[in-house]
Image: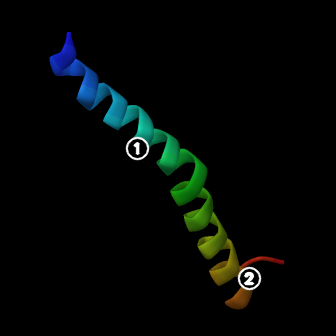
Amino acid sequence: MSRIAAPMVGGMISSTVLTLAVIPAIYALVKQWRILHGVER
């Protein structure tokens, strides 16, 4: 059971970081780029 614990904890941590930090940051960058280039109204 301990052989699967480390990858499981790592996956849970990385998915949390991805969901809370990386995806909103990418969304904000795309939104800012679209506003600057006149794609958004």
**Quick one: label 1, few (<14), some, or many (20+) residues within 10 Å?**
few
Image point 74% across, 82% down: which residue? Answer: 35
Q: Amino acid at mark 2?
A: Ile
Q: Is residue 33 left or right of residue 18?
A: right
Q: For the N terminus, which image quadrant? A: top left
Q: Secondary structure at mark 1?
A: helix
Percent x, y for residue 16?
Answer: 51, 41
| Number of marks in the rendered image | 2
Q: Position of residue 20 (x, y in %)?
A: 59, 49
Q: Position of residue 6 (x, y in %)?
A: 25, 29
In the rendered view, does 13 fall on the left or right side of 34? Answer: left
Task: Find residue 7 and report its horizontal and vertical position in percent.
Answer: 25, 30
Marks 2 and 1, how far apart in space? 30 Å
Left or right: 12 in relation to 38: left
Tell me the element at label 2: helix
Question: Would residue 5 appear left or right of 19 to someone viewing this image?
Answer: left
Label placed on residue 26: none
Outermost bottom residue: 37
Q: Earlier in the sequence, mark 2 or mark 1?
A: 1
Q: Are marks 2 and 1 in contact (CB under 8 Å)?
A: no
Q: Which mark is residue 35?
A: 2
Q: Which mark is residue 14?
A: 1
Q: Is residue 34 above or below residue 25?
A: below
Q: Residues within 10 Å of mark 2 (few under 14, many from 20)?
A: few
Quarter the C terminus occupies: bottom right
Q: Splitting the image into 4 quarters, where does residue 24 fall? A: bottom right
Q: Nearer the viewer, mark 2 or mark 1?
A: 1
Q: Amino acid at mark 1?
A: Ser
